Image (cartoon, rainbow, N blue to C red):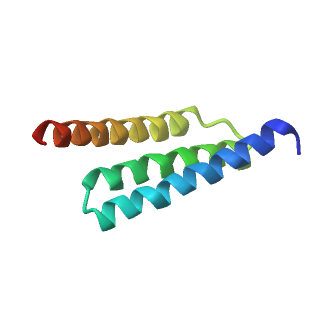
Amino acid sequence: MDLAAIIQMIAILLECAVVVIAVLIATRNNKTYGWLIAITFALFALFDIVRIFIPYDFPLLYSLILFVACASMLYAVWLMYNETRKS
């Protein structure tokens, strides 16, 4: 396993850690944006796993995963912004 592959696997583990923490934010603090962050980083991890373990090139699948992840994060950030404006 080369250095790039090791870094990629560590990145996937970090993405999974973000998912866990985001779910805790969603469930313990009752924040919708926690679920959106969890969805985003779960999709990022899925994207990385698909790229590593499926040797064929699926540009439409990659684009769809990244599009949904970005849309989810955009909505999460919008919710956080609106929450800070109310305080």
Position of 60 compared to 87: left or right? right
| Residue 28 placement (x, y as % from top left) | 32, 67
The quarter of the image holding the C terminus is top left
Say which of 81 and 50 sits in front.
81
Specify the quadrant of the image occupied by residue 80: top left
Q: Is residue 32 visible?
A: yes
Query: Where is residue 58 shown, x and y percent of the image?
Result: 60, 37
Q: In terms of depth relative to the viewer, which is nearer, 53 or 4?
A: 4
In the picture as drawn, the residue positioned furthest to the bottom comes out as 28
Asked if residue 54 shows in the view, the reply is no
| Residue drawn at (30%, 43%) of the image | 76
Q: Residue at x 18, y 43 (%)?
A: 83
Identity of the residue drawn at 48% across and 48% down: 41
Residue nearer the viewer, 82 or 57: 82
User: Is residue 19 depicted above or below 78 in this figure?
Assistant: below
Q: What x and y, as percent, mark residue 16?
A: 56, 55
Position of residue 68 in the picture relative to residue 63 (left or right): left
Give the farthest residue toward the front. 87
**Exactly how many numbered labels are in the figure?**
0
Q: State which quarter of the image contains the N terminus.
A: top right
Residue at 42%, 53% in the rendered image = 38
Query: Residue farthest to the right?
Result: 1
Q: Position of residue 64 (x, y in %)?
A: 45, 38
**As drawn, 76 above or below 19:** above
